[in-house]
Image: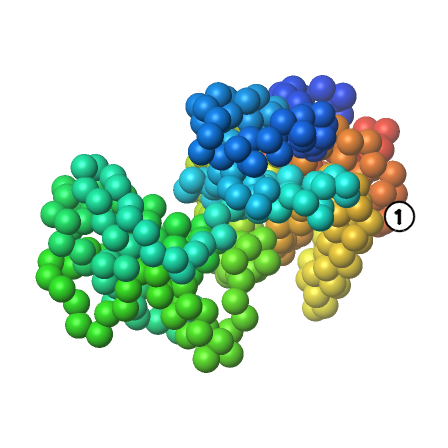
Amino acid sequence: MDKTLKEKIDAWTDTDEHTEIPFRKRVQDFWKWFTDNEKKLSQIVENRGKSDSENAVEFIAAGTNLINEEVHFNLGGDYEFTFSVEGHSSLFYLYPYVVSQLPEQFKDKWHFFPFNQGTDSSFSFGMYGVNVAMDQVQVAVTYQEDINAFSIRFYEKDLCSLEEAQSYNAYYIMMEIMLGEGLSYQYIADVERADAPLEDAISLPALRTYIVDTLKAHDKEVFDNPQQVYTSYRFEPQENEELRFDVVAGSSCFQPLVANYYNGSTELFDQLNRFGAQAMFIAFPFENEKEGDAKKALDFRYELEDRLSEELLSPEGLGLLLGGAVGTGTCYIDLLLFDKPAFMEKIIPFLKDYPQYRFYLSDFRQDCDLYRLFEAEDDESED
């Protein structure tokens, strides 16, 4: 078997470092709280502007804290409840699951959104001591077809009179309000502050329509949910004791997580873990001695990914398939688990259908133990 895998194998144990409440359980607890308190929540919506907003926020936070104390939200008219990503890309992969679990009895009344959806309506925005009318913010837009994203230059006299860091921060917040957090994350490549009024500019409230129309004009599908967009990547294999450095090619709908791994960062892994979700990958070695071996392993990986997603992850709310990769002697299937203990109970019986392979599970980070996903008498038999 692969030497790196063998050196990192850790004996199977029923306990591990992830002792927090699983994300799936937190979501269940949140919806139970919501169901128990729906009448009061409705009253808060119906009495917006009349009741004490501070007490209302505190009351709702008691519910969202069941998911995590870092949850941000907005409660709007027409029974709208919007979660806010607030710049944390990991939440694009968690909040859609929360929204998908809205109890059936509330679906005709309540409107839940996993992140800010955007608007084209202008209004005044105040921050850092200045008030800016959204429709007075000029933006010059350049579409970069090679990366399917947009470069932005912005100008508004008072906004651009702020210190540079404040000016950029205020603009990004305003842009996300207008575009929506999903479109902003997916399609804005870079932003630059201008020093003078711009020629051939549009107003900030018109930016969303401009981006959507430009994408469609270039025969591009428009996505506002990062989970829907898979990016391919290719690497030169490297000599390294860590897994994944043998990768030749892969794809992911969460590319920053892949980048974190190779940079030795656990920032996104830790963010997810604080919500009770674990970014992990399944690794399985394959023989790569003759022509066609790698293709055979790759085809099997695709088959297994489909089965995992359709039969295990999606139906039971156990997690997401994030992508996968193939190396010179190992294949990888990337997962985001919403309930690791429940997943562990099911995955070993599930993988018994494939006795020709040996499967292992790893955190999506370097320098960690592997968990064996098969039953074996001893490791010597695997040489």
The residue sitting at 55% across, 27% down in the picture is 60
x and y percent of residue 212 in the render?
A: 45, 69
Q: Is residue 186 visible?
A: no
The count of marks equals: 1
In this image, 105 relative to 127: left or right?
right
Nearest the eye: 381 or 324 = 324
Quadrant location of the C terminus in the rendered image: top right
In the picture, residue 140 is in which quadrant? bottom left
- What amino acid type should be assigned to the residue bearing mark 1? Asp
In this image, 52 relative to 350: left or right?
left
In this image, 232 relative to 32: left or right?
left
Mark 1 neighbour class, 10 Å CA radius: few under 14, some 14 to 19, many 20 or more: few
For label 1, the residue is 353
In this image, 51 relative to 166: left or right?
right
Q: Is residue 31 visible?
A: yes
x and y percent of residue 358 in the render?
A: 77, 43
Quadrant location of the N terminus in the rendered image: top right
x and y percent of residue 135 in the render?
A: 28, 59
Nearest the eye: 41 or 116 = 41
The residue sitting at 52% across, 38% down in the picture is 75
Nearest the eye: 47 or 213 = 47
Nearest the eye: 212 or 281 = 212
The residue sitting at 52% across, 58% down in the picture is 224
Q: Is residue 45 above or below residue 124?
A: above
The residue sitting at 75% across, 51% down in the picture is 309
Colour pattern? rainbow
x and y percent of residue 262 in the render?
A: 46, 44
SS type, badge 1: loop
